[in-house]
Amino acid sequence: MRSGLARVRALGGVGLGVILLTIGGPLWSAAMARLSADLVPFVSERTTSLVMLRVTAVTVTKDASGPQEHGRLVGEVVDVFRSDGLKPKDLVEIAFERVADPVAREHQGFDHWNVLPLRDGQLIIFALRPLDPPRRWSALAASAVDSVMSADALALREAVRLESSPAPPDQRREMLRGALGKDQNLLVLYALDALGRRRVLDRDTSIVVLVDALAAPDGSSVRRDAIVDSLTRSYFFDGRLGAEPGNVRIVGALAAELVRETDPGRREQLLRYLASCVLGSFSRDASQDATIRASLVKKVQTPSPPDVRRVLTELTGQGSEGGQRIARRLLEAWTGAAPGSS
């Protein structure tokens, strides 16, 4: 994730290949997927099984012609979050491929198989698809946990409950609002995925929910970073719409977060998020682009423009050289939008 939660936000992407493994004599083939560390996208995939396994055996074979090793993990199901084909105490076999060199493996976490602990007794939550059920499965995502009552396990159970709820939009809005208020990373990411990528609510409603969650006085900076990151994505901030209410609300929320923040590192990060919205391109016509930007900034009245200009002025002399340049450009935008400016 970028700065805390903000994003693990790389939601998934799998590359496929084929390997052959000897299991009990005969050869069997398995579609090998690059393993994701992010369980969230699979909460909404109803055909995916979400289970916790306890590793009972791992066997690996070095690839004689390359740097990889092929393996087979056997695990006992200890908890089922959602599955049509698995139940507690079932044994599951999963084929995997990873870098053979343990030192090199640590630096190649883009495939989570390379960093996933596969010790006997290790508890791992998996998103699985059937390969040759009930025994053989393909792993899509995984997260190692330290107990059946771990934070990720509890959050995943709640996310699955929310996903399966038949609640109407108004109730679903409040359920997602509640999820965003929890300092449970996986549950927050589930709510952000539902509101953003999956658009379970309309854009305007989702923006209000996210802005309200960001303004709440409680909550960790990690959770707020994830909300900030989400607000700046094209699901929500849309430069093509110019200075319309949703975009104005987002810029105001980012500016308010910047004004509140005192940590220098997070201040600079927020500065860059704000710039990604305000200093982006709104039109190919330079004059129209400037007019839209000025209108967008002028419509932000909370926090007050003087407060924003004060903080931006401070940041023109603090932080990295790049951050100072961004602060100067944002300050120009806020100064140009002030009443009486030409």
Image (spheres, helix red, strand yellow):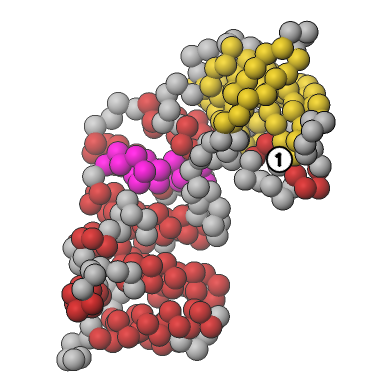
- Residue 250 vs 44, above or below: the answer is below
Q: Name the residue rendered at 37%, 82% in the picture.
A: 329
Q: Name the residue rendered at 45%, 21% in the picture.
A: 47
Residue 37 appears in which quarter of the rendering?
top right
Q: Viewed as shown, does residue 93 lie left or right of 237?
A: right
Whether residue 289 is visible to the viewer of this picture, yes or no, is yes
- Residue 256 vs 201, above or below: the answer is below
Is residue 135 a member of the stretch shown in magenta?
no
Give coordinates of residue 69: x percent, y percent.
Answer: 77, 32
Give coordinates of residue 114: x percent, y percent.
Answer: 71, 40
Whether residue 216 is visible to the viewer of this picture, yes or no, is no
Quarter the C terminus occupies: bottom left
Residue 194 appears in which quarter of the rendering?
top left
Residue 102 appears in which quarter of the rendering?
top right
Q: Name the residue rendered at 38%, 72% in the picture.
A: 275
- Count of marks placed on residues: 1
Is residue 194 a member of the stretch shown in magenta?
yes
Q: Give the residue number, with chain letter if any, for mark 1.
A: 114
**Along the viewing direction, whichever of 260 and 133 lies nearer the viewer:** 133
As shown in the figure, which amino acid type bears the numbered disc 1?
Asn
User: Label 1: how many residues lie within 10 Å, few (<14), some (14-19) or many (20+)?
Assistant: many
- Residue 211 vs 243, above or below: the answer is above
Residue extending farthest top: 25
Give coordinates of residue 149: x percent, y percent.
Answer: 61, 33
**Secondary structure, magenta segment, majority class:** helix
Q: Name the residue rendered at 54%, 36% in the picture.
A: 14
Give coordinates of residue 231: x percent, y percent.
Answer: 36, 57
* Span colored in magenta: 185-201
